[in-house]
Each structure stands twice: as structure tokens, then as C-alpha cells.
Image (cartoon, grey):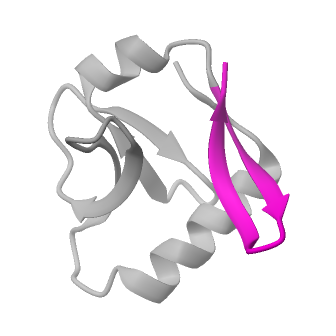
């Protein structure tokens, strides 16, 4: 399972509210072709790892295969000159 820090949860919630406009869609953590992690809006699949932020609202989905790869990792926030970004710590 992926751990999500409180600051990363707040950031995910802001991203969700700003970018996911279609009912029934949730943020999905994905691995792109270049090997980088990203966020897309998608529908929940039966085998997804589901993360809940508050008030039992689903905010992040992780496919079972990706969840197995990232097991034990933590999603957090990193401050850089360019701004605040989500990043994964192992």
C-alpha cells in the first residue's frame, strides 16, 4: 500500500477540485511510457487500491499492478524553485 502524507492529501484534493469536472471520475495514479508517474481522471476498477481523503470521499486510485510496484512508498510534497510538486519516496 502507498502511504500519503497530509500535505500530499491536501494537494491531491486541490488538484481533484480544480481539474476533475465529470461526475464519477477520480484521480488515478498512472505510470506513463517514459517511466514517470502522473495523474489522470479515471473510473474506479475492481482491483484498484483506493485512497480516501476525508468524509469518505475517494480521491486517488492506484491500479493493482502499480500498487504492487510502489508498495511501501510514500507520496509527499517537495518544494522547489518552480513550485510545490507531488513526489514518491521509497
Quarter of the image with the C terminus is top right
Residue 72 covered by magenta stretch: no
- Dominant SS of magenta comes to strand
Near-viewer residue (17 or 78): 78
Is residue 3 visible from the viewing direction of this image? yes
Residue drawn at (54%, 47%) of the image: 52
Instruction: Please tell me in which quadrant of the rendered image residue 24 appears.
Output: bottom left
Span highlighted in magenta in the image: 74-90
Position in image of residue 25 (x %, y %): 24, 67
Number of marks present in the image shown = 0
- Position of residue 62 in the picture relative to residue 64 (left or right): right
Instruction: Please tell me in which quadrant of the rendered image residue 61 appears.
Output: top left
Position in image of residue 41 (x %, y %): 27, 65
Residue drawn at (25%, 18%) of the image: 65
Image height of 67 relative to 39, above or below: above
Residue drawn at (44%, 54%) of the image: 58
Image height of 24 relative to 59, above or below: below
- Position of residue 47 in the picture relative to residue 3 (left or right): left
Position in image of residue 86 (x %, y %): 64, 54
- Position of residue 4 in the picture relative to residue 12 (left or right): right
Residue 83 covered by magenta stretch: yes
Is residue 27 visible from the viewing direction of this image? no
Residue drawn at (79%, 53%) of the image: 78
Near-viewer residue (21 or 90): 90
Instruction: Please tell me in which quadrant of the rendered image residue 80 appears.
Output: bottom right
Position in image of residue 29 (x %, y %): 37, 46
Amino acid at each position: 500500500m502507498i502511504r500519503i502524507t497530509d500535505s500530499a492529501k491536501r494537494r491531491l484534493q486541490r488538484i481533484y477540485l480544480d481539474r476533475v469536472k465529470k461526475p464519477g471520475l477520480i484521480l488515478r495514479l498512472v505510470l506513463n511510457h517514459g517511466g514517470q508517474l502522473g495523474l489522470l481522471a479515471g473510473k474506479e476498477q475492481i482491483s484498484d487500491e483506493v485512497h480516501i481523503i476525508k468524509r469518505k470521499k475517494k480521491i486517488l486510485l492506484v491500479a493493482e499492478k502499480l500498487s504492487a510496484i510502489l508498495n511501501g512508498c510514500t507520496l509527499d510534497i517537495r518544494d522547489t524553485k518552480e513550485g510545490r510538486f507531488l513526489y514518491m519516496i521509497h
